Amino acid sequence: MNKTALVTGVTGQDGAYLSKLLLEKGYRVHGLLRRSASADVVGTRLNWFGIQQDIQLHDGNLTDLSGLIRIVEEIRADEVYNLAAQSFVKSSWQQPLLTGTVTGLGAANMLEAVRLACPGTRFYQASSSEMYGLIQEPVQSEKTPFYPRSPYAAAKLYAHWMTVNYRESFGMHASSGILFNHESPLRGIEFVTRKITDGVARIKLGMRDRLALGNLDAKRDWGHARDYVKAMWLMLQQEVPDDYVIATGRTVSVRDFCELAFGHVGLTMEDHVTVDERYMRPAEVDVLLGNPAKAKERLGWEAETPLEDMVAEMVEADLLRLKRHECL
Ligand code: NDP
Ligand code: GDP
């Protein structure tokens, strides 16, 4: 019989890529949908893949435990992927309590709903490399101590340890993917990679001349969301639940990313990029670099998409979107 999955954060970047993957594998996919007054934009990412009609959507919110219990009980999914979060680090300083409530306690709500309503369900938690923050080792693995540097990272760390705790306390099949930054044409426009590729496309099309950014020296280990959702699925296919770092093992600066994106359309970043204090952070995560050796050894997972290819794909997608007057 086909498996059933429930995906929270189904309208986000990873929700769309994961839903596509699960549908291709023959899953029945259910998604938790946060009600919005703007129903027309809710399915933008799912519609990009033309899969919104294939997903059964359920009204719900990570902050509403009773609703989550009802949904988990009704679906009785084989696998739950908890991707929902207030996921933007910069906003977490403006909305620390909301971030804690949704990104931290919301994950605990999801764990509790599964424990109470369908404890045999396998559970995936979207943990984050931001938990390493002020890095304690130059290359971060599952054994590297955490040092969160934002309300977002602190909330993710709580959710991460709750996942470990529910696994150890209640024997739940609960796994955490400590995913390093991953991007795609469906990345939110507020994140630096999409902001850059959208900006490059606008400049190339003559719609604007400048792109204002913050810290150009920050370095990230950027991979492709399409590759990373495969790792999520693989974790839940293992007999034994565990935590895994998912990364490419290569780190580059925001400046390097910019050079690639501008270079792709024959432009030079120095002619267009300005640095604006507004985009600096109260506490910065200077550099992240993951060691995905455990994922390779145990899951047989490896990042497949070179950074250069991903940058080109994102710039091309933004050029096309702007020419067609589409928004995302
Ligand atoms: P997005 O920001 O694209 O998606 C977040 C999703 O969470 C959206 O579907 C959003 O719904 C939903 N959501 C937000 N608040 C609530 C709420 N209160 N109740 C229910 N749903 C809610 O994130 P990504 O897809 O990029 O990331 C997926 C997960 O992985 C997130 O938890 C993120 O923090 C984590 N992560 C991401 C990394 C990355 O580089 N992308 C790296 C490491 C971890 P709506 O559409 O209504 O806003
Ligand atoms: P994060 O790693 O989850 O915070 O992902 P972001 O894409 O938001 O930020 C990645 C890095 O880019 C951080 O170190 C930011 O400080 C840096 N950065 C530099 N300029 C900008 C900008 O204009 N917007 C964003 N979002 N980040 C920027």
Image (spheres, helix red, strand yellow):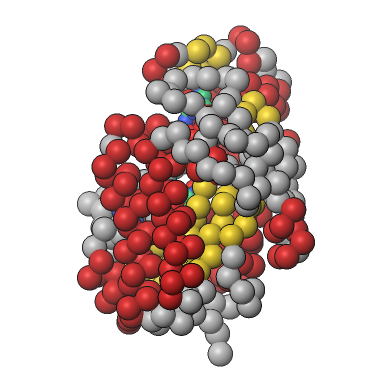
Q: Which corner quadrant of the image does residue 268 belong to? A: top right
- Left or right, residue 1 beside residue 112: right
Q: Which corner quadrant of the image does residue 250 belong to? A: top right
The residue at the point 30 percent across, 38 percent down is 96
Residue 238 lies, in percent from the top left, at: 64, 73
Q: Which corner quadrant of the image does residue 35 belong to? A: bottom left
266, above or below 146, in the image? above
Residue 163 lies, in percent from the top left, at: 45, 62
The residue at the point 50 percent across, 38 percent down is 147
The residue at the point 54 percent across, 40 percent down is 132
The residue at the point 55 percent across, 14 percent down is 273
Question: Can you name the residue that lies furthest to the bottom here?
Answer: 1
101, above or below 21, in the image? above
284, above or below 313, in the image? above
- Left or right, residue 96 beside residue 111: left
Split into 4 quadrants, where in the image is the C terminus?
Answer: top left
Residue 237 lies, in percent from the top left, at: 62, 74
Split into 4 quadrants, where in the image is the N terminus?
Answer: bottom right
- Left or right, residue 227 beside residue 86: right
Residue 83 in sight: no
